[in-house]
Image (cartoon, rainbow, N blue to C red):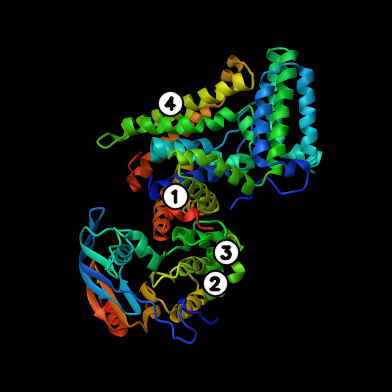
């Protein structure tokens, strides 16, 4: 595995990089989507470096991630990300918080790898010169700088996943949200991504059916019908989820 | 991703500015419309063909590039010969051939990147009037290109799945799921674009 | 125009292009090859509505203009714009618009299945055939100087195939809208 270069920049040489973190608050958040309750009175304070979320399909896991970056607005209650409202201040929140979608094919917008990374950087106001540099650096962080000129269409599923992740890292977020990142990967790519995620200094909030991925997380939530039914250490949460799943 | 038809090169037509080539083509197309003399039109078609040949394209390649349009033109010529008269056929056929050759010469010698630049510059005045948003327009074109191979692939998968279930490939049974998946994907892609911070801040074009 | 609209327009344009990859059948002596792309144009109007429906073919035509082989049979480049059948290409825009406008009137909640299929078929026929042919025939007759009579009767040969496409588009739309609720606009 290649060495992971921390995202922190602009500090003195030798200073240990400050780990990027945000505090995400849910205050009695409810979401109703298409006549169905997706989240039902969720109150949480998320500040740990590694947070996992498990639950059956339709339990509200993806909706919870989407409320954090303002893709879904709460029908009641309030979400804040380091004090910012993701619906009203979407631009600011999306600059510090990236979401990796389940299927990288739906996240990659441009036909060429380097152009796709440039898309996110341009959206966040980086200049053309900085864009090239940051895109290269983000690809290098994941050990895929050789893919810069390649066409998305010709990449494997695992490579597309890394390109989508590089697109997020290029913008230097503090928090990364992963929506079932391993569900479309074979075992080798799954293991590669798991090692890579373990090395990321950013704060990670990971929704997964792949419970092994969360085994050494600091905190794991279990969701059921839009409510948090367990919140605690990984081992206990996973055991709780297994029992409830039947 | 789909490759453009045009290639970069060093022939005189390659070196002409894109805007000039497009303007010249529009001018020629308009002018030919008002000419009915067969000798002039045949001359124009020959000049256009020589121009096309000057781009380095061989006659055999030109014939295969333009097989379909030339079939259509030939068919129109036959219709005119049979139902009207020789004079009409003698002006319709060379006029259409001249246009086809000239336009193909421009297409072959202009890359998609050059045309995209010209397209964006042409949009400039409309953008200043607030009629179009060039950023959104070019994102839409890019997205369409990005998703063509995925939709083709999806159509093939659906067809195979239907065949495996013994449904054959009834067009409605294939097109319905294809359209539904396309709409669902459009929503997810739009969410992903928003999540990645689109649209860029207003002044981002000033930063170089 | 929000990002979702961009998504629908772009992906429908991609769908129209993808339908062109399905083999097209140039018939000797007839000036327009039969393709499924015009089915995609009808669907754009019926499913997305007039405005977004018309913008999907605008995207396809823009891609043709920048030299990409996105039309059936791998055709593209501005040669298409000055060819005799260009009217059948540019006509896609008003065709999808009118189809979408009529679909908003003729299809809606509270109507029976048969009434909806008939309404959607009429929308697709008036927009995707009558309006499209009017553009295509006008161009053939005056642009290619073929004469109105011959342009009209020559194009009629394609009408039966296109009526079948219109009915297919109506049936597809009915089922698509059962599975995916989308307001036409």
C-alpha span from label 4 to label 3 = 44 Å
Q: Chain of mark 2?
A: A
Q: Quadrant of the C terminus of chain C?
A: top left
- Camera-near label (3 vs 2) is 2
Mark identifier at residue A137 = 2
Q: Chain of mark 3?
A: A
Marks 4/3 same chain: no
Q: Residue at x 61, y 28 (%)?
A: C85
Q: Residue at x 39, y 52 (%)?
A: B187
C-alpha span from label 3 to label 2 = 20 Å
* Nearer-the-camera pick, C158 or C182: C182
C-alpha span from label 1 to label 3 = 21 Å
Q: Chain of mark 1?
A: B
Q: Earlier in the sequence, mark 3 or mark 2?
A: 2
For disc 1, the marked residue is B182
For disc 4, the marked residue is C126
> Dot 3: within a 10 Å radius of its alpha carbon, few (fewer than 14), some, or many (20 or more) residues?
some
Q: How many marks?
A: 4
Q: In the rendered image, is residue A183 in sight?
A: yes
Helix or strand or loop: what does disc 4 sit on? helix
For disc 3, the marked residue is A155
Residue B181 in percent (x, y) is at: 43, 51
């Amino acid at each position: 595995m290649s060495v992971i270069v921390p995202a922190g920049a602009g500090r003195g040489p030798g200073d240990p990089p400050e780990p990027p973190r945000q505090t995400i608050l849910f205050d009695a958040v409810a979401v109703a989507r298409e006549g169905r309750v997706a989240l039902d009175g969720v109150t949480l304070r998320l500040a740990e470096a590694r947070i996992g979320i498990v639950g059956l399909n339709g339990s509200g896991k993806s909706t919870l991630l989407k409320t954090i970056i303002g893709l879904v607005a709460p029908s009641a209650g309030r979400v804040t990300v380091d004090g910012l409202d993701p619906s009203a201040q979407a631009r600011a929140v999306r600059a510090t918080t990236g979401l990796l979608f389940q299927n990288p094919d739906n996240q990659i917008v441009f036909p060429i790898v380097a152009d796709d990374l440039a898309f996110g950087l341009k959206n966040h106001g980086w200049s053309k010169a900085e864009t090239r540099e940051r895109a290269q650096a983000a690809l290098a962080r994941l050990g895929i700088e050789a893919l810069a000129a390649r066409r998305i269409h010709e990449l494997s599923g695992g490579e597309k996943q890394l390109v989508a992740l590089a697109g997020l890292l290029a913008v230097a977020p503090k928090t990364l949200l992963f929506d079932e990142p391993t569900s479309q990967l074979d075992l080798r790519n799954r293991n590669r991504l798991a090692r890579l995620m373990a090395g990321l200094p950013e704060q990670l909030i990971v929704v997964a059916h792949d419970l092994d991925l969360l085994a050494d997380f600091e905190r794991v939530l279990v969701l059921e019908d839009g409510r948090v039914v367990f919140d605690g250490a990984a081992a206990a949460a996973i055991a709780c989820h297994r029992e409830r799943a039947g | 991703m789909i490759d453009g038809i045009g290639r970069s090169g060093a022939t005189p037509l390659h070196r002409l500015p894109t805007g000039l080539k497009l303007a010249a083509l529009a001018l020629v197309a308009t002018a030919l419309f008002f000419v009915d003399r067969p000798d002039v039109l045949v001359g124009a078609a020959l000049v256009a063909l020589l121009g096309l040949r000057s781009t380095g394209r061989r006659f055999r390649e030109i014939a295969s590039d333009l097989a379909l349009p030339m079939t259509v033109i030939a068919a129109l010529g036959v219709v005119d010969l049979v139902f009207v008269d020789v004079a009409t056929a003698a002006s319709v056929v060379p006029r259409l051939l001249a246009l086809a050759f000239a336009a193909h010469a421009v297409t072959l010698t202009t890359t998609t990147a050059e045309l995209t630049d010209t397209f964006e510059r042409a949009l400039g005045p409309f953008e200043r009037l607030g009629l179009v948003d060039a950023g959104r327009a070019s994102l839409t074109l890019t997205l369409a290109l990005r998703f063509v191979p995925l939709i083709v692939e999806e159509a093939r998968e659906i067809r195979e799945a239907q065949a495996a279930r013994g449904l054959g490939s009834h067009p409605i049974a294939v097109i319905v799921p294809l359209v539904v998946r396309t709409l669902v994907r459009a929503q997810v892609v739009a969410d992903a674009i928003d999540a990645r911070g689109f649209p860029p801040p207003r002044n981002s074009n000033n930063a170089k | 125009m929000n990002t979702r609209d961009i998504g629908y327009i772009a992906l429908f344009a991609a769908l129209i292009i993808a339908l062109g990859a399905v083999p097209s059948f140039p018939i000797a002596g007839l000036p327009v090859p039969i393709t499924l792309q015009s089915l995609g144009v009808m669907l754009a109007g019926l499913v997305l509505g007039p405005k977004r429906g018309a913008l999907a073919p605008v995207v396809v035509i823009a891609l043709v203009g920048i030299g990409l082989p996105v039309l059936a049979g791998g055709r593209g480049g501005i040669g298409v714009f000055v060819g005799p059948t260009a009217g059948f290409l540019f006509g896609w825009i008003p065709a999808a618009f009118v189809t979408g406008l009529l679909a908003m009137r003729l299809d809606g909640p509270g109507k029976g299945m048969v009434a909806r299929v008939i309404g959607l078929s009429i929308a697709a026929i008036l927009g995707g055939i009558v309006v499209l042919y009017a553009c295509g025939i006008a161009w053939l007759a005056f642009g290619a100087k073929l004469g109105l009579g011959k342009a009209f009767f020559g194009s009629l040969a394609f009408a039966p195939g296109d009526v079948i496409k219109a009915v297919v588009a109506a049936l597809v739309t009915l089922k698509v809208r059962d599975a995916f609720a989308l307001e036409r606009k």
